[in-house]
């Protein structure tokens, strides 16, 4: 069976959930070979092996932390040349898509971004994407070279599939461009204790109907009762009610959680583009004609200031 390279997104050896989802997809089309780079790369092996990695190619050179994405592209190119994989899978983060695009150019291959599913095909892997603000689904495959595919978080389940996970050193020769852009400083993002927005299984978002920054407290309370991330529409962000880093939509972040709760959000196409692939969508809006109700699984016509606190109380009661 052909091998499939999976780029490992980790922090000092702690593997992030989208990588484990990629291993699930990789097993559909071949044998997963993980590529772990940077400090703690070798420490990822046990978790990766538990989820199907037959081998872990590891490199811990300081260049991966001291410079931007080019050293990682150099390493993935070296892995492609060593393995001759059936495909390269990368998480669909901002950095992941830049790495994937640069790699595709390097190896003369096609690229598919923001896939939401992956299956084996007679002529290579077939990726499913959502198009035109998720109004359509398309199936595509790369027709030249080794397919490079980025996959949205929450597109596949995390499944245990114990494999060897043998660690092998990945020799990397860095290009002249690798040290062109140096990282001078880093500032850790202040933790809210909530899940990362793009990776969360549940997202609770507020929009124009929240009617003020101070009122986002009720959105946060519901999110915390569910162990969810907090999102916001562009209208709420533009009004300064919530940080831009939490914006869901075409000009914000795309999310695909198991459950998406939209409170006081009308459902403009800009917002729908970022959340329409959610598995279950619930909307709370006092306007029964709001466009959001056209795509929801469950809709509540009512005042969010009454409905959301009652929902939060009910969740907390059932948890207690």
Image (spheres, rainbow, N blue to C red):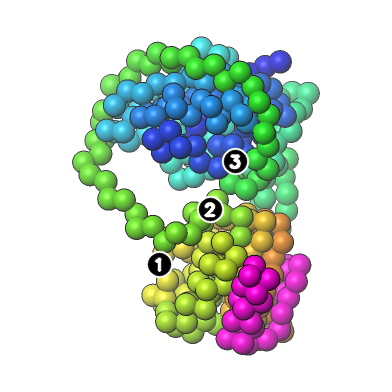
Residue 56 spot, x, y in % from top left: 52, 21
Q: Which mark is residue 262?
A: none
Cα–Cα span, label 3 and label 1: 25 Å
Q: Residue at x 74, y 33 (%)?
A: 119
Between 85 and 124, the residue placed more toward the observer is: 85
Between 297 and 200, the residue placed more toward the observer is: 200
Where, quadrant-wise, is the C terminus in this rendering?
bottom right
Which secondary structure is most common in the magenta stretch?
helix
Q: Earlier in the sequence, mark 2 or mark 3?
A: 3
Q: Residues in magenta?
A: 293-320
Q: Secondary structure at mark 1?
A: loop
Between 114 and 106, the residue placed more toward the observer is: 114
Name the residue that disc number 2 marks.
198
Q: Secondary structure at mark 2?
A: helix
Name the residue that disc number 3 marks.
151
Where, quadrant-wise, is the N terminus in this rendering?
top right
Residue 308 painted magenta: yes
Q: Secondary structure at mark 3?
A: strand
Q: Residues within 10 Å of mark 1 (few under 14, many from 20)?
A: few
Q: Earlier in the sequence, mark 1 or mark 2?
A: 2
Is residue 71 visible in the rendered image? The answer is: yes
Q: Residue at x 34, y 54 (%)?
A: 189
Q: Residue at x 29, y 27 (%)?
A: 63
Name the residue that disc number 1 marks.
243
Residue farthest to the right? 122
Q: Residues within 10 Å of mark 2 (few under 14, many from 20)?
A: many
Residue 83 spot, x, y in % from top left: 55, 14
């Amino acid at each position: 069976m052909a091998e499939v390279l999976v780029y490992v997104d980790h922090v000092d050896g702690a593997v992030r959930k989208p990588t484990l989802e990629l291993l699930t997809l990789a097993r559909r089309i071949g044998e997963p070979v993980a590529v772990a780079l940077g400090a703690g790369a070798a420490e990822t092996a046990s978790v990766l092996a538990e989820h199907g990695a037959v081998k872990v190619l590891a490199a811990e050179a300081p260049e991966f932390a001291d410079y931007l994405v080019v050293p990682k592209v150099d390493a993935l190119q070296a892995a492609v040349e060593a393995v001759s994989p059936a495909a390269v899978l990368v998480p669909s983060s901002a950095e992941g898509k830049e790495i994937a695009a640069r790699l595709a150019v390097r190896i003369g291959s096609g690229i598919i971004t923001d896939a939401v599913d992956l299956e084996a095909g007679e002529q290579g892997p077939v990726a499913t994407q959502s198009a035109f603000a998720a109004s359509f689904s398309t199936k595509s495959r790369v027709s030249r070279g080794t397919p490079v595919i980025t996959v949205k978080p929450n597109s596949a389940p995390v499944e245990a599939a114990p494999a060897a996970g043998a660690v092998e050193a990945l020799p990397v020769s860095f290009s002249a461009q690798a040290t062109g852009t140096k990282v001078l400083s880093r500032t850790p993002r202040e933790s809210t204790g909530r899940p990362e927005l793009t990776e969360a299984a549940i997202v609770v978002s507020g929009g124009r109907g929240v009617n003020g920054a101070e009122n986002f407290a009720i959105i946060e309370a519901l999110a915390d009762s569910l162990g969810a991330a907090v999102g916001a529409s562009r209208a709420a962000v533009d009004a300064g009610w919530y940080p831009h880093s939490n914006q869901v939509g075409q000009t914000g972040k795309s999310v695909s959680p198991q459950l998406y709760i939209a409170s006081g959000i009308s459902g403009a196409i800009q917002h729908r583009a970022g959340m329409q692939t959610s598995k279950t969508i619930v909307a709370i809006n006092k306007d029964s004609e709001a466009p959001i109700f056209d795509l929801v699984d469950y809709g509540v016509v009512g005042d969010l200031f009454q409905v959301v606190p009652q929902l939060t109380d009910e969740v907390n009661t059932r948890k207690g």
